[in-house]
Image (cartoon, helix red, strand yellow):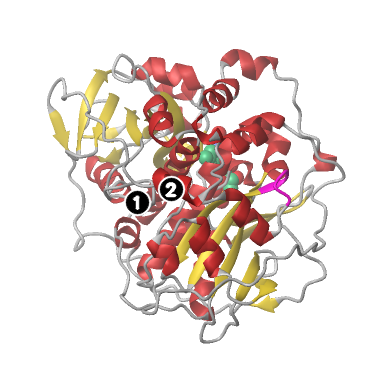
Amino acid sequence: MVNLDIQAGRTYHNATKHSHRSIRTNPHFLDWGNQPLPFKIYPKLELLPLPRRFEEGGMPALRAIAEVRGRESAVPDLQNLSQLLHFSAGITRRRAWSGGQIYFRAAACTGALYEIELYLACATLPDLEAGLYHYAADEFGLRKLRTGDFRRVLVEATANQPSIASAPVIILCTATYWRNAWKYQARTYRHFGWDNGTILANLLAVSTSLDFPAEVICGFVDADINRLLDIDSEREVAFSLVPIGRLADSQPPPAEHISPLGLDTVPLSRREVDYPAMRMMHTASSLVMPKEVADWRGGTPMRRHKEPGGELLSLEPLGDKEIPADSIEQVILRRGSTRQFAREPISFVELSTILDRSTRGVAADFLHPFGTSLNDLYLIVNAVEGLPSGSYFFHRERRGLELLREGNFRSQAGDLGLEQELPADASVAIFFLADLEAIFERYGNRGYRAVQLEAGIVGGKLYLSAYALRLGATGLTYYDDDVVSFFSPHAEGKSAVFLVALGKSTKQRGLRS
Ligand SMILES: Cc1cc2nc3c(=O)[nH]c(=O)nc-3n(C[C@H](O)[C@H](O)[C@H](O)COP(=O)(O)O)c2cc1C
């Protein structure tokens, strides 16, 4: 079983670390004339337009981000699908620049390169024929790739995952190498998890708001899903599945024969550059048999954290009656990555609310029991009222912060964040670190996908929670080993996975309610 050859995962991770040296000696430059298209286009298939009537008055954002719920019997219609797709991966802003237009999307994405595509497989819905569809974000519609009910393929590929077996709709997320590797080269495989994760944070929150059950599925037989989608897995690969809704009669009919489709798509660029390391990481983390999938899921490695060395500062989050009423859709529409932070403090209540709402748990097949996590959060606090500046560890189970080292670490935060000003100017920089060895041991190389995906989801929730409070946020990249050294000895043995900076944007000055 290739997934258990964890040397491959270690090798990929080490080879794609950023260091001062790797950044300074990398001769890569951006070939603007060969920039990939940010959309997948099937030019010969008819477009089924999605309704553009969006509901913006759903559940308060800070509840939708934090809660998991869903009716016993819940079948989405086209209007619901339109809502789910638009607020997860739809175009929410356009900006003109000298090279053309940038289409910004509902969720943050490294380099605004948007390498994640969404498809859906559904039973017959009230106003949509059973089929396999591609979501065309640029035209806001669906293109039907296959007619018929193909959900059984997904049930078998996930070894009878109950939430897949009972879902009327399953959203399939794929990742396209070249679209992101054009800028980020082999490190792109990490970005798949991050950029898929931010989309999933939105999708899970909007599903909760619509009262549809939803869960993130990372364990499946890769080749079966890629064959169903008829994607060229040297270029594009299935990364996660999300069953949406629940049917009382839970068994999808036997699947139709899966024949190749051979559909034309518009080339992304004149030429593509291959980075074999990321494709090797994908192959090394592939699951090949349903039995392997069944053994893979569940049973998150439970870790005992060191007892707090000193006083634990308990979070003081807002309760449901105190949170802003702004709906999840309103918050998604106003989200954008903060380009400059004002060096102003946020309150401890705001930081507490963001941490509390973002870390209550993610419904995922690799996070059992619910509420466990693969990532640990470490903070550099630059400016939070009532909290000494310094470095902190977040004790998730105890809902409190442990001060590791007091001091002004603004310049270190900037340096760790790839020498950018954003984490130095922010009020707080939140670093995600994980015990990769324990994850590899339990989940094989597939654990690497899971830990990046979880980071993207929790990172996406941090973004949304900050914007719900009219604060700013941005994802960031970082110098891997320097981050671990900075938080050591507490973080010894862990690896850096993700970084989000939070604070007040210079644009938002004075906007706070
Ligand atoms: C995981 C992640 C890492 C990012 N890293 C950086 C970064 O290092 N520097 C930066 O200026 N922006 C960074 N961004 C922000 C993206 O550039 C931004 O999401 C993208 O341009 C889309 O814009 P929007 O978020 O405003 O919609 C990152 C975003 C994500 C999700």
Distance Cα–Cα, label 1 vs label 2: 8 Å
Tell me which residue sits at (59%, 79%) in the image. Answer: 130
Residue 396 found in image quarter:
top left
Residue 263 screen position, x and y as percent: 80, 64
Q: Earlier in the sequence, mark 1 or mark 2?
A: 1
Tell me which residue sits at (41%, 59%) in the image. Answer: 161
Residue 395 screen position, x and y as percent: 22, 34
Residue 443 found in image quarter:
top left
User: Mark 2 sits on what residue?
Assistant: 457
Q: Which portion, as a residue range, is magenta?
A: 232-236
Q: Is residue 427 above or below residue 148?
A: above
Looking at numbered disc 2 in the image, what kind of residue is underneath it?
Answer: Ile
Residue 152 is left or right of residue 372, and the answer is right
Which corner quadrant of the figure contains ligand 1? top right
Contact between labelled residues 2 and 1, with CB atoms less than 8 Å apart: yes
Observer-nearest of 385 and 152: 152
- Most extreme residue toward the bottom is 126
- Is the CB–ligand 1 distance for label 2 below 8 Å? no
Q: Is residue 299 above or below residue 17?
A: below
Residue 291 screen position, x and y as percent: 46, 48
Query: Split into 4 quadrants, where in the image is the C terminus?
Result: bottom left
Observer-nearest of 108 and 349: 108
User: Mark 1 sits on what residue?
Assistant: 362
Residue 73 is left or right of residue 26, and the answer is left
Q: Residues within 10 Å of mark 2 (few under 14, many from 20)?
A: many
SS at badge 1 = loop
Residue 138 screen position, x and y as percent: 69, 64
Tell me which residue sits at (43%, 19%) in the image. Answer: 412
